[in-house]
Protein backbone atom coordinates (compact mmCIF):
# COMPACT_ATOMS: atom_id res chain seq x y z
CA UNK A 1 0.00 0.00 0.00
CA UNK A 2 3.00 2.32 0.45
CA UNK A 3 3.37 2.19 -3.32
CA UNK A 4 0.03 3.84 -3.90
CA UNK A 5 0.88 7.33 -2.63
CA UNK A 6 3.67 8.19 -5.09
CA UNK A 7 1.61 6.75 -7.96
CA UNK A 8 -1.56 8.72 -7.25
CA UNK A 9 0.49 11.86 -6.57
CA UNK A 10 2.29 11.53 -9.92
CA UNK A 11 -1.05 11.13 -11.70
CA UNK A 12 -2.45 14.20 -9.95
CA UNK A 13 0.56 16.38 -10.76
CA UNK A 14 0.51 15.40 -14.42
CA UNK A 15 -3.22 15.95 -14.81
CA UNK A 16 -3.19 19.19 -12.82
CA UNK A 17 -0.79 20.66 -15.35
CA UNK A 18 -3.50 20.23 -17.98
CA UNK A 19 -6.66 20.93 -15.98
CA UNK A 20 -5.51 23.22 -13.19
CA UNK A 21 -6.60 22.81 -9.58
CA UNK A 22 -9.86 24.75 -9.48
CA UNK A 23 -12.21 21.97 -10.61
CA UNK A 24 -12.45 18.19 -10.61
CA UNK A 25 -9.58 16.51 -12.44
CA UNK A 26 -10.20 13.38 -14.57
CA UNK A 27 -7.83 10.47 -15.08
CA UNK A 28 -7.92 6.90 -16.39
CA UNK A 29 -6.22 3.60 -15.82
CA UNK A 30 -3.62 4.37 -18.48
CA UNK A 31 -2.49 7.39 -16.45
CA UNK A 32 -1.90 5.08 -13.48
CA UNK A 33 0.08 2.70 -15.66
CA UNK A 34 2.15 5.61 -16.98
CA UNK A 35 2.90 6.60 -13.40
CA UNK A 36 4.05 3.09 -12.51
CA UNK A 37 6.35 3.04 -15.53
CA UNK A 38 7.78 6.49 -14.81
CA UNK A 39 8.35 5.67 -11.14
CA UNK A 40 9.44 2.06 -11.75
CA UNK A 41 6.81 0.81 -9.29
CA UNK A 42 4.81 -2.35 -9.98
CA UNK A 43 1.29 -2.92 -8.61
CA UNK A 44 -0.53 -6.06 -9.69
CA UNK A 45 -4.07 -4.89 -8.95
CA UNK A 46 -4.17 -1.50 -10.67
CA UNK A 47 -7.89 -0.71 -9.99
CA UNK A 48 -7.24 -1.05 -6.25
CA UNK A 49 -5.25 2.19 -6.33
CA UNK A 50 -8.20 4.50 -7.10
CA UNK A 51 -10.45 2.28 -4.96
CA UNK A 52 -8.17 2.86 -1.97
CA UNK A 53 -8.70 6.60 -2.27
CA UNK A 54 -12.45 6.11 -2.63
CA UNK A 55 -12.97 4.10 0.56
CA UNK A 56 -9.90 3.29 2.60
CA UNK A 57 -7.59 6.25 2.93
CA UNK A 58 -7.41 10.03 2.51
CA UNK A 59 -5.59 11.56 -0.41
CA UNK A 60 -1.92 12.46 0.15
CA UNK A 61 -1.22 15.92 1.54
CA UNK A 62 0.28 17.01 -1.80
CA UNK A 63 -3.21 16.58 -3.30
CA UNK A 64 -5.39 17.47 -0.31
CA UNK A 65 -3.74 20.89 0.01
CA UNK A 66 -5.68 21.98 -3.08
CA UNK A 67 -9.00 21.01 -1.50
CA UNK A 68 -9.41 17.58 -3.07
CA UNK A 69 -11.04 15.04 -0.76
CA UNK A 70 -11.29 11.72 -2.61
CA UNK A 71 -11.37 9.83 -5.89
CA UNK A 72 -14.74 9.02 -7.48
CA UNK A 73 -15.98 7.36 -10.67
CA UNK A 74 -17.60 9.74 -13.15
CA UNK A 75 -20.53 7.96 -14.81
CA UNK A 76 -21.37 10.97 -16.96
CA UNK A 77 -18.44 10.38 -19.28
CA UNK A 78 -18.70 7.91 -22.12
CA UNK A 79 -16.43 4.91 -22.60
CA UNK A 80 -16.08 1.37 -21.34
CA UNK A 81 -13.17 2.12 -19.02
CA UNK A 82 -14.08 4.17 -15.95
CA UNK A 83 -13.16 7.83 -15.77
CA UNK A 84 -11.90 8.64 -12.29
CA UNK A 85 -12.06 12.11 -10.79
CA UNK A 86 -10.14 13.89 -8.09
CA UNK A 87 -13.09 15.62 -6.44
CA UNK A 88 -13.46 18.44 -3.93
CA UNK A 89 -16.91 17.22 -2.88
CA UNK A 90 -16.80 15.41 0.47
CA UNK A 91 -17.29 11.71 -0.22
CA UNK A 92 -16.49 9.74 2.91
CA UNK A 93 -19.31 9.10 5.39
CA UNK A 94 -17.99 8.49 8.92
CA UNK A 95 -19.81 6.73 11.72
CA UNK A 96 -21.67 9.48 13.62
CA UNK A 97 -20.81 10.20 17.24
CA UNK A 98 -24.53 10.03 18.12
CA UNK A 99 -26.68 7.30 16.56
CA UNK A 100 -30.47 7.17 16.33
CA UNK A 101 -30.82 3.90 18.25
CA UNK A 102 -28.58 1.37 20.02
CA UNK A 103 -29.48 -2.32 20.16
CA UNK A 104 -27.91 -5.36 21.76
CA UNK A 105 -27.93 -8.78 20.19
CA UNK A 106 -26.50 -12.11 21.26
CA UNK A 107 -23.24 -13.41 19.85
CA UNK A 108 -24.92 -16.83 20.18
CA UNK A 109 -26.81 -16.01 17.00
CA UNK A 110 -23.61 -17.03 15.21
CA UNK A 111 -22.82 -20.76 14.92
CA UNK A 112 -19.69 -21.68 16.85
CA UNK A 113 -17.54 -22.42 13.78
CA UNK A 114 -18.53 -19.09 12.23
CA UNK A 115 -17.86 -17.21 15.46
CA UNK A 116 -14.42 -18.82 15.76
CA UNK A 117 -13.21 -18.02 12.25
CA UNK A 118 -15.17 -14.97 11.08
CA UNK A 119 -13.08 -12.18 9.61
CA UNK A 120 -13.35 -8.45 10.11
CA UNK A 121 -13.54 -7.65 6.41
CA UNK A 122 -16.71 -6.74 4.53
CA UNK A 123 -17.69 -10.35 3.87
CA UNK A 124 -17.30 -11.23 7.54
CA UNK A 125 -19.51 -8.28 8.40
CA UNK A 126 -22.22 -9.40 5.98
CA UNK A 127 -22.08 -12.97 7.28
CA UNK A 128 -22.67 -11.83 10.86
CA UNK A 129 -25.51 -9.54 9.80
CA UNK A 130 -27.18 -12.44 7.97
CA UNK A 131 -26.92 -14.96 10.82
CA UNK A 132 -28.10 -12.43 13.41
CA UNK A 133 -31.08 -11.32 11.32
CA UNK A 134 -30.21 -7.66 11.75
CA UNK A 135 -31.78 -6.56 8.47
CA UNK A 136 -35.23 -7.78 9.50
CA UNK A 137 -34.93 -5.76 12.68
CA UNK A 138 -33.51 -2.66 11.01
CA UNK A 139 -35.88 -2.49 8.01
CA UNK A 140 -39.08 -3.85 9.59
CA UNK A 141 -39.37 -6.23 6.63
CA UNK A 142 -39.01 -9.96 6.10
CA UNK A 143 -35.68 -10.01 4.28
CA UNK A 144 -34.27 -12.70 2.00
CA UNK A 145 -30.69 -12.86 0.78
CA UNK A 146 -30.55 -12.91 -3.01
CA UNK A 147 -26.94 -12.51 -4.12
CA UNK A 148 -23.46 -11.42 -3.00
CA UNK A 149 -20.87 -9.72 -5.22
CA UNK A 150 -23.55 -8.74 -7.72
CA UNK A 151 -21.95 -7.44 -10.91
CA UNK A 152 -24.08 -4.92 -12.77
CA UNK A 153 -23.87 -2.07 -15.25
CA UNK A 154 -24.16 1.54 -14.18
CA UNK A 155 -24.54 3.84 -17.19
CA UNK A 156 -22.58 1.40 -19.30
CA UNK A 157 -19.80 0.67 -16.82
CA UNK A 158 -19.29 -2.32 -14.59
CA UNK A 159 -19.98 -2.01 -10.86
CA UNK A 160 -20.23 -4.49 -8.01
CA UNK A 161 -22.73 -4.50 -5.14
CA UNK A 162 -21.65 -6.22 -1.93
CA UNK A 163 -25.04 -7.78 -1.15
CA UNK A 164 -28.59 -7.72 -2.49
CA UNK A 165 -31.63 -8.70 -0.44
CA UNK A 166 -35.32 -8.67 -1.22
CA UNK A 167 -37.58 -7.34 1.52
CA UNK A 168 -41.28 -8.14 1.83
CA UNK A 169 -43.59 -5.76 3.67
CA UNK A 170 -46.79 -6.76 5.53
CA UNK A 171 -48.83 -6.19 2.35
CA UNK A 172 -46.64 -8.61 0.39
CA UNK A 173 -44.96 -5.90 -1.67
CA UNK A 174 -41.30 -6.36 -2.57
CA UNK A 175 -38.41 -3.94 -2.19
CA UNK A 176 -34.78 -4.35 -3.26
CA UNK A 177 -32.24 -3.79 -0.47
CA UNK A 178 -28.91 -2.65 -1.94
CA UNK A 179 -26.24 -3.14 0.72
CA UNK A 180 -22.71 -1.81 0.89
CA UNK A 181 -20.44 -3.22 3.60
CA UNK A 182 -17.24 -1.87 5.10
CA UNK A 183 -14.95 -3.62 7.53
CA UNK A 184 -12.64 -2.11 10.12
CA UNK A 185 -10.44 0.53 8.49
CA UNK A 186 -12.76 1.24 5.54
CA UNK A 187 -15.18 4.15 5.11
CA UNK A 188 -18.47 4.47 3.29
CA UNK A 189 -18.37 6.47 0.06
CA UNK A 190 -21.17 8.61 -1.38
CA UNK A 191 -20.26 7.93 -4.99
CA UNK A 192 -20.33 4.18 -4.38
CA UNK A 193 -23.75 4.35 -2.71
CA UNK A 194 -25.15 6.31 -5.65
CA UNK A 195 -23.79 3.80 -8.15
CA UNK A 196 -25.21 0.88 -6.13
CA UNK A 197 -28.66 2.45 -6.11
CA UNK A 198 -28.75 3.44 -9.77
CA UNK A 199 -27.46 0.02 -10.83
CA UNK A 200 -30.32 -1.82 -9.10
CA UNK A 201 -32.90 0.73 -10.26
CA UNK A 202 -31.84 0.18 -13.87
CA UNK A 203 -32.25 -3.62 -13.68
CA UNK A 204 -35.83 -4.54 -14.70
CA UNK A 205 -35.63 -7.98 -13.07
CA UNK A 206 -35.50 -6.46 -9.57
CA UNK A 207 -38.27 -4.66 -7.65
CA UNK A 208 -38.93 -1.07 -8.67
CA UNK A 209 -38.57 0.13 -5.10
CA UNK A 210 -34.96 0.29 -3.84
CA UNK A 211 -33.69 1.06 -0.35
CA UNK A 212 -30.02 1.96 0.03
CA UNK A 213 -28.39 0.44 3.11
CA UNK A 214 -24.91 -0.02 4.50
CA UNK A 215 -23.26 -1.86 7.35
CA UNK A 216 -20.01 -0.78 8.98
CA UNK A 217 -17.87 -2.60 11.53
CA UNK A 218 -15.69 -0.48 13.83
CA UNK A 219 -12.46 -1.32 15.61
CA UNK A 220 -14.32 -2.31 18.79
CA UNK A 221 -16.48 -4.86 16.98
CA UNK A 222 -19.68 -2.81 16.95
CA UNK A 223 -21.94 -2.83 13.91
CA UNK A 224 -23.58 0.26 12.46
CA UNK A 225 -26.49 -0.06 10.04
CA UNK A 226 -27.17 2.96 7.84
CA UNK A 227 -30.12 3.85 5.65
CA UNK A 228 -29.66 6.55 3.02
CA UNK A 229 -31.83 8.60 0.72
CA UNK A 230 -30.39 8.82 -2.79
CA UNK A 231 -32.05 11.51 -4.89
CA UNK A 232 -31.62 13.90 -7.78
CA UNK A 233 -30.86 17.56 -7.07
CA UNK A 234 -30.92 19.26 -10.45
CA UNK A 235 -28.30 17.50 -12.54
CA UNK A 236 -26.55 15.93 -9.56
CA UNK A 237 -27.14 12.79 -7.50
CA UNK A 238 -27.13 13.39 -3.76
CA UNK A 239 -26.94 11.17 -0.69
CA UNK A 240 -28.37 11.95 2.73
CA UNK A 241 -28.23 9.74 5.80
CA UNK A 242 -31.73 8.90 7.05
CA UNK A 243 -30.79 6.97 10.19
CA UNK A 244 -28.03 4.96 11.85
CA UNK A 245 -28.48 2.14 14.36
CA UNK A 246 -25.70 0.67 16.45
CA UNK A 247 -25.64 -3.04 17.31
CA UNK A 248 -23.57 -4.45 20.14
CA UNK A 249 -22.99 -8.20 20.16
CA UNK A 250 -22.97 -9.72 23.63
CA UNK A 251 -22.53 -13.24 25.00
CA UNK A 252 -25.51 -14.70 26.78
Image: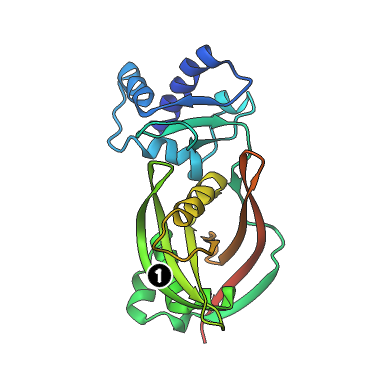
Measured from the top left, where is residue 148 in percent x and y?
36, 62
- The answer to whether one can see residue 182 in this image is no
Which residue is the extreme one toward the bottom?
Answer: 252
Measured from the top left, where is residue 161 in percent x and y?
41, 55
Residue ID at (34%, 24%): 30
Whether residue 35 is situated above or below residue 182 in the rendered picture: above
Residue ID at (36%, 81%): 112
Q: Quadrant of residue 97?
A: bottom right
Residue ID at (50%, 41%): 54
Q: How is the image coloured?
A: rainbow
Instruction: Identify which residue, 46 or 173, lies in the foreground.
Output: 173
Whether residue 195 is situated above or below residue 24 in the rendered picture: below
Element type where label 1 sits in the image = helix
Whether residue 194 is situated above or below residue 16 in the rendered picture: below
The image quadrant where one finds the N terminus is top left
Which residue is the extreme one toward the front?
Answer: 204
Image position of 236 (left or right of 110) = right
Which residue is the extreme one toward the top?
Answer: 17
- The answer to whether one can see residue 165 in this image is yes
Measured from the top left, where is residue 43 in percent x and y?
30, 33
Residue ID at (53%, 51%): 193
Image position of 78 (left or right of 69) = left
Instruction: Identify which residue, 237 or 188, lies in the foreground.
Output: 237
Q: Which residue carries the number 1 mark? A: 127
Whether residue 137 is situated above or below residue 69 in the rendered picture: below
Measured from the top left, where is residue 41 in percent x and y?
31, 25
Image position of 73 (left or right of 119) = right
Instruction: Identify which residue, 164 or 109, lies in the foreground.
Output: 164
Instruction: Identify which residue, 251 or 4, lies in the foreground.
Output: 4
Amino acid sequence: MAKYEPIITWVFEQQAEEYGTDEEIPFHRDHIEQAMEALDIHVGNVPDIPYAYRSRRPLPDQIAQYGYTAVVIDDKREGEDPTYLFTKTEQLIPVPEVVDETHRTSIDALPDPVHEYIGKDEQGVLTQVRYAGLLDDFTGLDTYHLQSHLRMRVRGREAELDDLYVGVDPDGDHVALAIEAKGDGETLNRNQLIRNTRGIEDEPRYPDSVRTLAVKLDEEGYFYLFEFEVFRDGDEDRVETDRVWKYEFESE
